[in-house]
Amino acid sequence: MSFFKRIAVLPFLLVLLSINVIAIPTAHAVEKSSGISVQSDFGSFFEGKRDSYVGAGWESCVTPATWSFDSSSLSGRESLREQKRIQWALDQWSKYTLVKFEFTGPMETFYSDTDFTLTPKNRNTSAPRHIYFDYVAGSESKLFTGLVYGFGLPSSVDPVQKTIQSGAIIIKQEFMDKYGKSSPKLVRSLYLHEIGHVLGLGHASNEANIMHPLVIGNVALGAGDINGVKSLSRACATESFTTD
Ligand SMILES: [Zn+2]
């Protein structure tokens, strides 16, 4: 199993990484579960990487969180298809967190192969409570080795509230070219998994959970995924209301 960790700390910006391997079902043996029950099989993304952030998650505010993707490497048809799949994947998690994600349109981003973040090309600052998606050629990221076809990470965290403020999800372009049309379940499964990381989840050990590091085409969240994300998301503390 390929598992990569990296920590780079910037002011109020945390960059960590968790990549995962896509296993084409017939080509890979799936790892045996470790004996932990499926429903308790979850952990924080930050465990063993940045312990003070263990438990960090997203806030469920009345104002939805947002997402955008850089679809400049996709055709118009592919772009619409992936937009629907990403929204579907976000909605699966939203059922259990009440954190809603609203599409704000395509946005070109710059991928940094130094800190593995995505930043909008047209401005300097990242939007709050936002997830950026991008499709990056294998040659543009040193992380795309072997069967690694995607990675996702929380890219900024409020260290006081322990709320995740933004995330980045990078999908290998060649993966999309090869499987985008032929293997919809694999693509959906990859989105579900990487979104799980952005929501604050680490890897699970049982293949019944989406957060298992081998992506095998599951398109349903497991009991551990659900319990995990419920434990991480919290009520909105940043939204202000006017009162009489
Ligand atoms: Zn992963």
Image: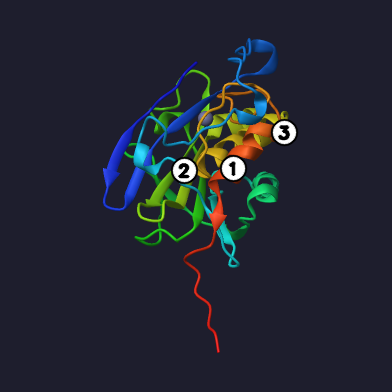
Neighbours of disc 2 within 10 Å: few (<14), some (14-19), many (20+) = many
- Amino acid carrying mark 2 in the image: Gly
Q: Is mark 3 within 8 Å of ligand 1?
A: no
Q: On screen, 170 above or below 149?
A: below
Residue 109 location (% of width, % of height):
44, 51
**Which quadrant does the C terminus fall into?**
bottom right
Please tell me whether mark 1 sits on a helix, a strand or a loop.
helix
Q: Earlier in the sequence, mark 2 or mark 3?
A: 2
Q: Which residue is mark 1?
A: 229
Question: Could you say which is closer to the camera, residue 71 or residue 166?
Answer: 166
Q: Give how far apart the Cα atoms at labels 1 and 3 are.
A: 16 Å
**Does the CB distance between marks 1 and 3 fall below 8 Å?**
no
Residue 124 location (% of width, % of height):
34, 60
Q: Which residue is mark 2?
A: 55
The residue that appears at 58% across and 67% down in the rendered structure is 63
- Amino acid carrying mark 1 in the image: Val
Please tell me whether mark 2 sits on a helix, a strand or a loop.
loop
- Amino acid carrying mark 3 in the image: Val
The residue that appears at 70% across and 12% down in the rendered structure is 26
Q: Is residue 222 visible?
A: no
Q: Is 49 placed left or right of 39 in the picture?
A: left
Q: Earlier in the sequence, mark 1 or mark 3?
A: 3
Q: Is residue 231 visible?
A: yes
Neighbours of disc 1 within 10 Å: few (<14), some (14-19), many (20+) = many
**Does the CB distance between marks 2 and 3 fall below 8 Å?**
no
Q: Which residue is mark 3?
A: 219
